[in-house]
Amino acid sequence: MATHLLDTSVCSQPLKKRPVMAALRRWQQLGDARCTTTAVCTAEIEWGLHKLSSQRHWQIYHGVLQPGLVVICPDAETWSSFARMKARQYQLGRPIADLDLLIAAVAVQRDLILATLDARHFALVEGLRWEDWSK
């Protein structure tokens, strides 16, 4: 059963020249069975791969990332949560990028801990449990 939702900064680590080893170790400790990601993250990664146009990176993606993790697709309930969360962030004067907020909405809706290397955005979201895997 999944306990953690990996954001793009964590999911993309196997593709990096110099990955954050703390994140890879934490991921390995938990294992793919306890980790999941979103279609938002896979889209962000695939956008980067298209931009990079590297066959080697695509092979890593298809061999390591793509088959390992269950991918959650945002449903209507997620989008409703996203809309409420976006309105709240604006009320607080702390708007967050839409894709980050959508990832956060998936984590909150599914009661998952968000694993990230970029806590500054996610720390602003009320009700979101998150961990900084950069350390």
Image (cartoon, grey):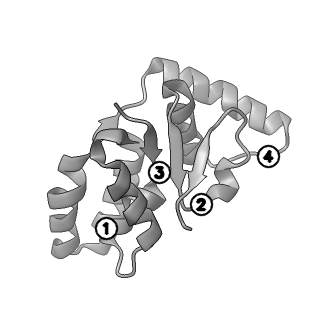
The CA distance from mark 1 to mark 3 is: 13 Å
Q: Earlier in the sequence, mark 3 or mark 4?
A: 3
CB-based contact (under 8 Å), mark 1 and mark 3 = no
Residue position marked by numbered label 4 in the rendering: 94
Measured along the vertical axis of the image, is residue 18 above or below residue 105?
A: below
Classify 10 Å Cα crowding around label 4: few (below 14), some (14-19), many (20 and above): few
Residue 38 visible in this rendered orientation of the protein: no
Q: Front-most of 22 and 46?
A: 22
Q: Position of residue 88 (x, y in %)?
A: 77, 31
In the picture, measured across the screen, residue 81 lies left or right of residue 86, that is left
Q: Quadrant of the N terminus?
A: top left
Indicate the amino acid at tag 3. Asp
The CA distance from mark 3 to mark 4 is: 20 Å
CB-based contact (under 8 Å), mark 2 and mark 3 = yes
Q: Earlier in the sequence, mark 2 or mark 4?
A: 4
Q: Quadrant of residue 102?
A: top right
Q: Secondary structure at mark 2?
A: loop
Q: Which mark is residue 7?
A: 3
Q: Residue at x 70, y 49 (%)?
A: 123
